Every structure is written in structure tokens, then in C-alpha cells.
Image: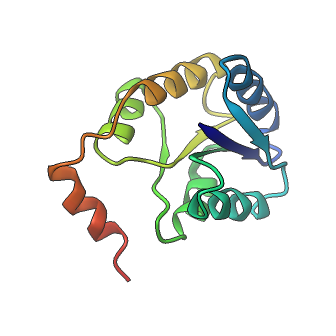
Amino acid sequence: MKIVAAADHGGFEMKNQIVEYLRKQGFAVEDLGTNYPDFAEKATAKVLAGQADLGILVCGTGIGISIAANRHKGIRAAILYDDYVAKVAREHNNANVLCFGGRTMTTEDVLRRIGIFLKAAYEGGRHDRRLCKLDLD
């Protein structure tokens, strides 16, 4: 799995810790930098083009970057603000961009939630209809 990661100044330190953690886990991670909101554009473009399987974005709260990412058809960016949400973001919503708050979350919580997300699998079935509706023009 290839993962792209980026952050603004509010999430810079956390993003660096996420990248280090994921690389130690054996994932190929491309760090796209910290030039908000340009990095959101870069990350979503790579996910949409199939050049990355997953994007991870960090800003101060996770809100601004999730809004920027979700502007793109085909992107399902989720703020993983607790462990349950990390699980269902994958199982029910098949999120392809994970968003975190560098000022509102601890690195320990974020790394745990990334692990929960990566271990989960999209359930498909009844969730497919809803996801198709999200990408309507």
C-alpha cells in the first residue's frame, strides 16, 4: 500500500511522527509537504489517479483539511476523532483520506486510529448505494 501524507503548520510535527510510524510498519509513504491548501490538492490528486491508495492529512483541527479534500469527487475524507469512527470510516464509508488535528489530538491516539483503520476492511453491500450517492454531480 502506498500512502501520501501532508500537513499545514498546525499539523507538521504530528505528520512527521505519522510518516515515521508508517515507514517503520513497512508502508511506502510519500511526504507531500506543508503548503496548505496546496498539499490537500496534491494528496487528493494522487489518490484519485491511483498513485496512492490512501491519503493522510493533518491541520490544526482536521476540519479545514477535510473540507479541502472533500471538494474532490471520489474523495471520501474522514476526521478520525475516535476509535469507533476509525473503524467505520473504513468499514462503512471506505474512506480514502484520513484527517487529523495536530492541535486537538494526541499522536498516540492518531497512530492507534490509523492502525484500527488499516486493519479494517470495507464491507460493501448496503454501503455501496450510499457511496455512489456521494459522488453524484
Q: In this view, does 65 lie above or below 9?
A: below
| Residue 74 seen anywhere in this rendered image of the structure | yes
Extreme residue in the left direction: 126
Q: Within the image, what quadrant is residue 27 found in?
A: top right
Find residue 103 and report its horizontal and vertical position in percent. 69, 34
Extreme residue in the bottom direction: 137
Left or right side of 115 for 135: left
Display colour scheme: rainbow
The foreground one among 19 and 14 is 19
Which residue is pictured at 75% across the width and 34% down the height?
A: 15
Q: In this view, does 42 lie above or below 100?
A: below
Q: In which quarter of the image is the C terminus?
A: bottom left
Q: In which quarter of the image is the N terminus?
A: top right
| Residue 59 seen anywhere in this rendered image of the structure | no
Find residue 115 and report its horizontal and vertical position in percent. 51, 22
Left or right side of 69 for 88: left
Which residue is pictured at 38% across the width and 39% down the height?
A: 90
Find residue 124 and report its horizontal and vertical position in percent. 24, 47
Left or right side of 120 for 36: right
Left or right side of 137 for 63: right
